[in-house]
Image (cartoon, rainbow, N blue to C red):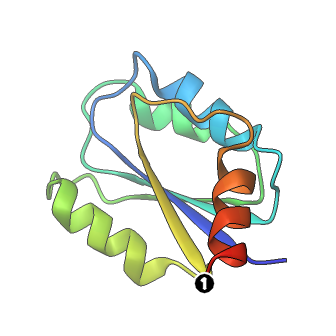
């Protein structure tokens, strides 16, 4: 079973963040690590992230706004998965997204 890294960069996303994180944690494919990096949010994003208790979450917050490209590269550097999936903080994942994508990747090298 392949490990998948799901990466989420967050900047002032409190309006949608709870739903975004919840949708990742409800994936039918469960062998993933979930890297969430806060990019210096000034709203309640950090508190929302900290409200989730799941061992698959790696949360990083340094309080500095470095921008999306920097944070996406940071996620890739930290990733331990065979595959990396990214999403934005205002998106939601369909429950079968990772399972479907992984099946396609592994059956069509």
Say which of 67 and 76 sits in front.
76
Q: Is residue 60 above or below residue 77?
A: above
Disc 1: which residue: 109
Residue 51 visible here: no
Q: Secondary structure at mark 1?
A: loop
The quadrant where residue 5 appears: bottom right
Residue 17 visible here: yes
Q: Residue at x 20, y 54 (%)?
A: 68
Say which of 53 and 96 sits in front.
96
Label 1: few (<14), some (14–19) or many (≥20) C-alpha neighbours in 10 Å: few
Q: Is residue 97 left or right of residue 45?
A: right
Q: Residue at x 27, y 38 (%)?
A: 11
Image quarter (top left, top right, bottom left or bottom right) of the N terminus: bottom right
The quadrant where residue 23 appears: top right
Q: Residue at x 82, y 56 (%)?
A: 30
Say which of 55 and 85 sits in front.
85
The percent coordinates of residue 56 (x first, y second) are 72, 60
The percent coordinates of residue 4 (x first, y second) are 65, 69
The percent coordinates of residue 55 (x first, y second) are 77, 59
């Amino acid at each position: 079973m392949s490990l998948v890294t799901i990466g989420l960069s967050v900047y002032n996303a409190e309006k949608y963040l709870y739903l975004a994180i919840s949708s990742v944690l409800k994936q039918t494919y469960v062998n993933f690590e979930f890297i969430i990096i806060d990019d210096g949010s000034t709203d309640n994003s950090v508190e929302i992230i900290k409200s989730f208790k799941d061992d698959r979450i790696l949360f990083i917050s340094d309080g500095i706004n470095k921008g999306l490209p920097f944070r996406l590269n940071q996620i890739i550097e930290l990733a331990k998965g065979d595959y990396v999936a990214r999403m934005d903080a205002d998106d939601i994942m369909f429950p079968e997204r990772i399972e479907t994508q992984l099946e396609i990747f592994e059956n069509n090298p």
